[in-house]
Image (tube, coloured by chain):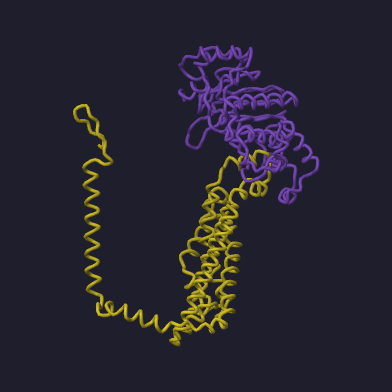
Chain colours: A yellow, B purple
């Protein structure tokens, strides 16, 4: 009981004694586990390598500079591919995510017992598999190249977009929907007037946010042969061409900064 | 003429919100429905246009039985009933004009409405109504830029552009300050008068109900406990509807105000939707 009475004086504490002790015990156990894990890891670590790490890092850095600037001319095409993979993948995902989201949202689904579980399953399965793994599978199915990358990005993004969108749909103000229904509007009109205006800002925000993430994801898809700048990255690493690797990393950073800038601008404009 | 007979609504939770309501509302009558929170006022008017499905009983609007209608017929019937809501229930991100025109959705095809190609007669009527309520300069404003009173006026236009035979009004003034509340109530009553519309107005504020309605129906726990003229609301009747309380001052206040209305002190605030309690409302808030 946090409130105690002592000689007419009521004192209040956040927790009573019992809870307070439990909280402290919790911290204590947490600390013990941390120390134990630390010990375990330190036994398993080859400390010689770790002590050597700064020198190794310096060595690699020295091999990376100066970046081979001329190599950038071989990259333009790959950057273009990367941006295309992200953009087309996002578009594909959005086209599929919108109906999925409406089927998954409790208040708009045609059937809570039959349609909703299917939609939720689509969302979960899309979200649970990383785009790199999707790409690995798709390269085997449709062959290496940009197309596999687009599909991989698209499949991974359906779940993300649909989940955020269906949550937005479930949070709409039902009064507005009720009001449109009360005018005698048809089902699709209720959707167009009562629901869509309410979720449009969320939809736009989700789209640019996912596009921004997909730019980053598509830079690595090349590692498994699904096109884009990652293709060059993996071959440069394989050839130990570190001056090329540094150029690629710089290009990726610039691309990601650019995409963040665009998505920030867009989100600012719509909200 | 609206006729309710033996109207029962039982929610899935087992609550009987309405226990057999019999009620006739003749054409052109403005009827106020009062009663404590949870008495079933909202349920009653929502059972009329079937936003809430009645469990038993019949609802007839000008002879047409509404409870048995299929989806398509129900939509047609809903077009003949305008509804005005407590929190205005405007589509916040659409403009005033779009909100008003949404009252014509039932008469407009999907693609026409999707591309906002409403019939010119509807647009003319929308301009006329907005002018009538004094909002013709706000046509292009987004609904969320308006103050509470302005929003409710848009809500009124949306209901009236349906060219309804009946108005269902759910707590039109609950989010408005006292002065705006009166203006809105006066507007609703004037418009009903102009168009010979009948209306059911759910309202918490006994004063307002007495000032504006021709007939008052008191609902308590899903049953009608009072049905009569505004003047018949004695302390005994109010006690029967709401429970034990000192009602003398509420009734006195109404009697004073019937003479002249100069008691308003609150100017209309820009945000407009904070509750500014007056005497009667204050009392009621303590009650429920």
At 52% across and 67% down in the image, what residue appears? A257
Measured as percent of width and height from the top left, residue A153 is found at 54, 69
Residue A17 vertical position relative to residue B22 in the rendered view, above or below = below
Q: Is residue A23 visible?
A: yes
Quarter of the image with the N terminus of chain A in it: top left
Left or right: B20, with A241 as reference point: right
Left or right: B197, with B12 as reference point: right
Q: Which residue of the protein is positioned furthest toward the bottom in this rendering?
A: A239
At 32% across and 80% down in the image, what residue appears? A55
Measured as percent of width and height from the top left, residue B37 is found at 50, 27
Q: Which residue of the protein is positioned furthest toward the left in this rendering?
A: A7
Given residues A172 and B6, the one toward you in this image is: A172
At 70% across and 36% down in the image, what residue appears? B77
Q: Which residue of the protein is positioned furthest toward the right in this rendering?
A: B121
Q: How many marks?
A: 0
Measured as percent of width and height from the top left, residue A107 is found at 55, 47
Residue A175 vertical position relative to residue A71 in the rendered view, above or below = above
Residue B175 vertical position relative to residue B103 in the rendered view, above or below = above
Q: Is residue A143 visible?
A: no
């Amino acid at each position: 009981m946090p409130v105690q009475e002592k000689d007419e004086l009521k004192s209040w504490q956040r927790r009573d004694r019992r809870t307070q002790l439990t909280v402290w015990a919790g911290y204590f156990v947490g600390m013990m586990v941390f120390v134990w894990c630390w010990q375990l890891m330190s036994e398993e670590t080859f400390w010689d390598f770790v002590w050597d790490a700064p020198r190794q890092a310096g060595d690699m850095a020295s091999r990376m500079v100066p970046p081979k600037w001329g190599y950038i001319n071989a990259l333009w095409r790959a950057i273009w591919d990367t941006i295309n993979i992200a953009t087309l993948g996002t578009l594909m995902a959005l086209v599929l995510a919108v109906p999925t989201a409406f089927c998954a949202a409790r208040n708009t689904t045609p059937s809570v017992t039959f349609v909703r579980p299917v939609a939720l399953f689509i969302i979960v399965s899309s979200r649970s598999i990383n785009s790199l793994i999707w790409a690995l599978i798709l390269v085997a199915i449709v062959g290496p190249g940009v197309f596999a990358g687009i599909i991989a990005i698209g499949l991974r993004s359906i779940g993300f977009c649909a989940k955020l969108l269906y949550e937005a749909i479930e949070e709409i103000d039902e009064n507005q929907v009720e009001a449109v229904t009360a005018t005698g509007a048809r089902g699709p009109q209720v959707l167009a007037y009562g629901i869509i205006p309410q979720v449009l800002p969320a939809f736009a925000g989700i789209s640019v946010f996912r596009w921004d993430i997909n730019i980053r994801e598509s830079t690595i898809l090349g590692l498994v042969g699904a096109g884009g700048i990652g293709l060059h990255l993996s071959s440069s690493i394989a050839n130990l061409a570190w001056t090329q690797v540094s150029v690629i990393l710089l290009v990726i950073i610039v691309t990601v900064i650019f995409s963040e800038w665009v998505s920030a601008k867009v989100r600012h404009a719509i909200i | 003429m609206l006729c309710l007979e033996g109207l029962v609504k039982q929610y899935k939770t087992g609550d009987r919100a309405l226990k057999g309501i019999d009620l006739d509302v003749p054409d052109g009558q403005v009827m106020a429905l009062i009663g404590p929170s949870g008495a079933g006022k909202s349920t009653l008017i929502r059972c009329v246009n079937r936003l809430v499905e009645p469990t038993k009983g019949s609802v007839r609007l000008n002879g047409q039985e509404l409870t048995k209608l299929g989806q398509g017929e129900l939509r047609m019937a809903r077009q003949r009933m305008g509804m005005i809501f407590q929190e205005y229930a405007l589509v916040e991100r659409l403009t005033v004009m779009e909100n008003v025109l949404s009252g014509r959705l039932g008469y407009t095809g999907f693609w026409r409405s999707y591309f906002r190609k409403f019939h010119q007669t509807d647009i003319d009527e929308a301009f006329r109504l907005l002018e009538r309520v004094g909002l013709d300069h706000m046509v292009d404003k987004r609904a969320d830029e308006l103050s509470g009173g302005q929003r409710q006026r848009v809500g009124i236009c949306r209901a009236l552009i349906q060219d309804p035979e009946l108005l269902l009004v759910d707590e039109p003034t609950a989010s408005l300050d006292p002065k705006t509340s009166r203006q809105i109530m006066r507007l609703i009553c004037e418009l009903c008068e102009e168009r010979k519309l009948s209306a059911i107005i759910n309202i918490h504020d006994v004063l307002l109900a007495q000032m504006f309605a021709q007939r008052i129906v008191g609902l308590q726990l899903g049953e009608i406990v009072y049905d009569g003229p505004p003047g018949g609301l004695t302390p005994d009747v109010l006690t029967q509807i709401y429970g034990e309380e000192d009602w003398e001052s509420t009734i006195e206040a109404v009697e004073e105000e019937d003479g002249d209305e100069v008691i308003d002190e609150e100017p209309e605030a820009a945000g407009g939707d904070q509750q500014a309690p007056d005497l009667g409302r204050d009392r009621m808030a303590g009650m429920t």
